[in-house]
Image (cartoon, helix red, strand yellow):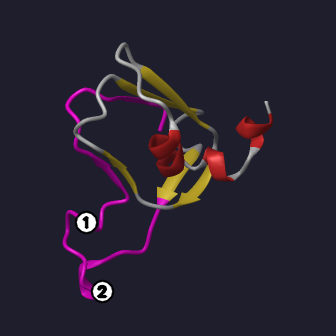
Amino acid sequence: MALETSPLLMMPSLRLRITPWLQKGTLIYVKAGVYEEYVSIEKKKKYLMMIGDGINQIIITGNRSVVDGWTTFKSATFVKNSKSPILNGL
C-alpha cells in the first residue's frame, strides 16, 4: 500500500491524528527510526495499541526545555493521557 511507505505516515504523532478510532480498538504500528516530534495520546483515545520494532529501534526525541519557557509536563516527547493504551516495543 502506497500510504504505508510514506515518511510522513510513519511519524507516530501524525498516525495518532489521522487513524480512525474504532470502538473495539485501534492498532498503530511504528517502524524503526528516529522521530523528532512530540507525541500525545488524548484522554478520549481509548483502546489504543501502539506496537513498534523494539526497544532501541525507535527513538522519539525533541528539544523543548524549561529554559526555553516550556513547563516540565509540556516538554515531554511522549505523553500518555489516556487510561488504556498499550505500548509495546517503543
Residue drawn at the location 63% of the way across and 39% of the way down: 31
Residue 65 higher or lower than 2, as above or below: below
Give the number of marks.
2
Where in the figure is residue 77, as x and y percent of width and height?
37, 59
Reading the image, the residue beneath label 2 is: 68
Residue 56 higher or lower than 63, as above or below: above
Where in the figure is residue 8, as x and y percent of width and height?
65, 53
C-alpha separation, residue under disc 2 versus residue under disc 1: 11 Å
Where in the figure is residue 67, as x and y percent of width and height?
26, 86
| 87 in the magenta segment | yes
Magenta-drawn stretch, dominant element (helix, strand or loop): loop
What segment carries the magenta color? 61-90
Amino acid, disc 2:
Asp
Reading the image, the residue beneath label 1 is: 74
Q: Which of pointers 2 and 1 lies earlier in the amino acid sequence?
A: 2
Residue drawn at the location 37% of the way across and 13% of the way down: 24
Where in the figure is residue 53, as x and y percent of width and height?
60, 33
Using the image, tell me which numbered label, if any, was put on residue 34: none
Indicate the quadrant containing the N terminus: top left, top right, bottom left or bottom right: top right
Query: Tag 1, which secondary structure?
Result: loop
| 65 in the magenta segment | yes
Amino acid, disc 1:
Lys
